[in-house]
Image (cartoon, rainbow, N blue to C red):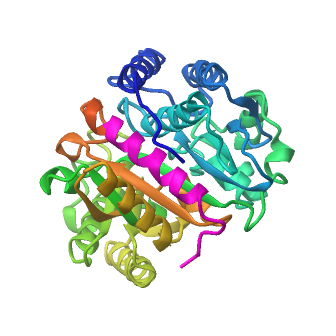
């Protein structure tokens, strides 16, 4: 396929980022477009219109994903690209959005060139990629991969709302979300462009990251049960302080991450206690934490070690603890042949690149169940993400789009992508 021009690319990307950045919940500092919220609904309408304007046949599937199709010449398995447009609470403007806008632009550029790919090109804005109060991330990609379970739809948020009910009220086909898997081996390839969300590319002065693996994630909640007593009269040696036990657990979880091998981290992101009064010893405390690594063996060992240590430490304080593990995903390596295609594309455009792991989870991890998968990273300023300070230069995004386009045309020219 001949070279495809990219005139106007930067302007369209910048306009898209600015338009979507206006669709946010003003109650948050930064950008808030959480799944099932009204700003998210409006943003999805914007994305659907953008796909139509780019010349794509567009639909919303039973999983709630917005899918645009650029028809290819033959009946071969499709090439798929895309990301998500939901955000964490008080997040940034680039996470996910860059991948969706890039995917639309790649399809637009191919169509406007007058050339046709051999394979259909599917552009997807996946439903609900970010972690949420229901404890089910990547809802849309899990669904099409056949990994969304019925019991996950029974999970409830802090307000007691059931996930399946919330999906239904959002206009989604809940039954269809459990029975709409695309099938293993149904994709020629999946490639996702994303901001790195870490500091490696910027520190190494590289324009492109070729992702080698996506980290596995183990999430846990721990509920500590102590006893409420008067804070002024109960001696320190006789207290059953649930909050202190939870605080000790947080340090234990941090210590596990600090002693981990490369590319493994631990985080406690939330803590609550009751009754929440200055002068009452807390009788109940709860923490929410997670472990991440590209090494399955480390995740398994860390989970066992933490379960044992948290129980022993709580018992030493006379406090009970109830652990619940919410396994999110296993580590997923990217396809080596797609890694090679991304590297060749970067070389062709004169862009310095390096191999990097992804500590963040992505829809790509679930799409790998249906065919060869790869990811392209572009730099994040200061490595910041999931915060208002998240930033990626427009020039870096444009470079990422060009590499994505060249990678897709490279993969389109191959009859099969070897799964390695």
- In this view, the residue in front, 350 or 42, is 350
| Residue occupying the point 78% across, 28% down | 171
Magenta stretch prevailing secondary structure: helix
Q: Quadrant location of residue 174?
A: top right
Image x and y of residue 162, in percent: 71, 41
| Residue occupying the point 45% across, 21% down | 16
Q: Is residue 281 above or below residue 105?
A: below
- In this view, the residue in front, 268 or 276, is 268
Q: Is residue 59 above or below residue 206?
A: above
| Residue occupying the point 52% across, 32% down | 109
Left/right of residue 74 with respect to residue 157 in the rendered view: right
Image x and y of residue 215, in percent: 42, 66
Image x and y of residue 389, in percent: 24, 32
| Residue occupying the point 25% across, 74% down | 262
Left/right of residue 1 with respect to residue 385 in the rendered view: right
Left/right of residue 67 with respect to residue 10 in the rendered view: right
Magenta segment boundaries in residue numbering = 397-420
Any magenta on residue 202?
A: no
* Residue 363 seen by the camera: yes
Q: How many numbered marks are there?
A: 0
Left/right of residue 366 with respect to residue 196 in the rendered view: right
Question: As drawn, which residue projects farthest toward the front?
Answer: 2
Q: Is residue 201 above or below residue 368?
A: above
Image x and y of residue 256, in percent: 28, 74
- In this view, the residue in front, 72 or 79, is 72
* Residue 228 seen by the camera: no
């Amino acid at each position: 396929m001949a070279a495809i021009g990219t005139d106007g690319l930067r302007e369209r990307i910048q306009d898209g980022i600015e338009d979507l950045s206006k669709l946010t919940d003003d109650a948050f500092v930064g950008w808030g477009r959480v799944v099932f919220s009204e700003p998210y609904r409006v943003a999805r309408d914007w994305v659907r219109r953008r796909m139509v304007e780019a010349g794509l046949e567009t639909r919303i599937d039973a999983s709630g994903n917005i899918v645009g199709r650029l028809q290819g010449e033959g009946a071969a398995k499709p090439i798929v690209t895309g990301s998500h447009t939901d955000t964490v609470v008080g997040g940034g403007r680039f996470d996910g959005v860059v991948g969706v806008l890039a995917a639309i632009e790649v399809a637009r550029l191919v169509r406007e060139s007058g050339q046709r790919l051999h394979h259909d090109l599917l552009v997807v804005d996946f439903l609900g990629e970010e972690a949420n109060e229901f404890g089910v991330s990547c809802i849309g990609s899990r669904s099409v991969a056949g990994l969304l379970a019925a019991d996950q739809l029974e999970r409830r948020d802090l307000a007691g709302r059931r996930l399946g009910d919330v999906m239904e009220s959002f206009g989604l086909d809940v039954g269809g979300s459990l029975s709409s898997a695309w099938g293993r081996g149904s994709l020629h390839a999946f490639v996702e462009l994303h901001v790195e969300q870490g500091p490696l590319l910027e520190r190494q002065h590289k324009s492109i990251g070729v992702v080698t693996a996506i980290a596995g994630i183990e999430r846990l909640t721990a509920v500590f049960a102590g006893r409420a007593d008067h804070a002024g009269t109960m001696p320190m040696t006789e207290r059953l302080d649930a909050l202190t036990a939870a605080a000790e657990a947080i340090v234990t979880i941090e210590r596990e991450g600090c002693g981990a091998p490369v590319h493994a981290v631990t985080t406690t992101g939330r803590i609550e206690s009751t009754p929440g009064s200055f002068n009452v010893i807390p009788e109940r405390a709860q923490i929410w934490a997670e472990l991440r690594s590209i090494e399955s063996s480390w995740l398994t060992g860390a989970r066992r070690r933490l379960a044992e240590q948290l129980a022993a430490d709580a018992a030493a304080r006379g406090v009970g603890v109830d652990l619940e593990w919410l396994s999110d995903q296993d580590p997923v390596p990217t396809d080596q042949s797609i890694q090679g295609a991304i590297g060749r594309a970067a070389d062709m455009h004169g862009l310095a690149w390096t191999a990097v792991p992804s500590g963040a989870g992505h829809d790509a991890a679930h799409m790998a169940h249906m065919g060869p998968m790869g990811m392209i990273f572009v730099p994040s300023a200061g490595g910041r993400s999931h915060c208002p300070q998240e930033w990626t230069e427009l020039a870096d995004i444009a470079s990422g789009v060009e590499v994505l386009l060249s990678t897709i045309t490279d993969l389109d020219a191959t009859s099969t992508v070897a799964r390695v």
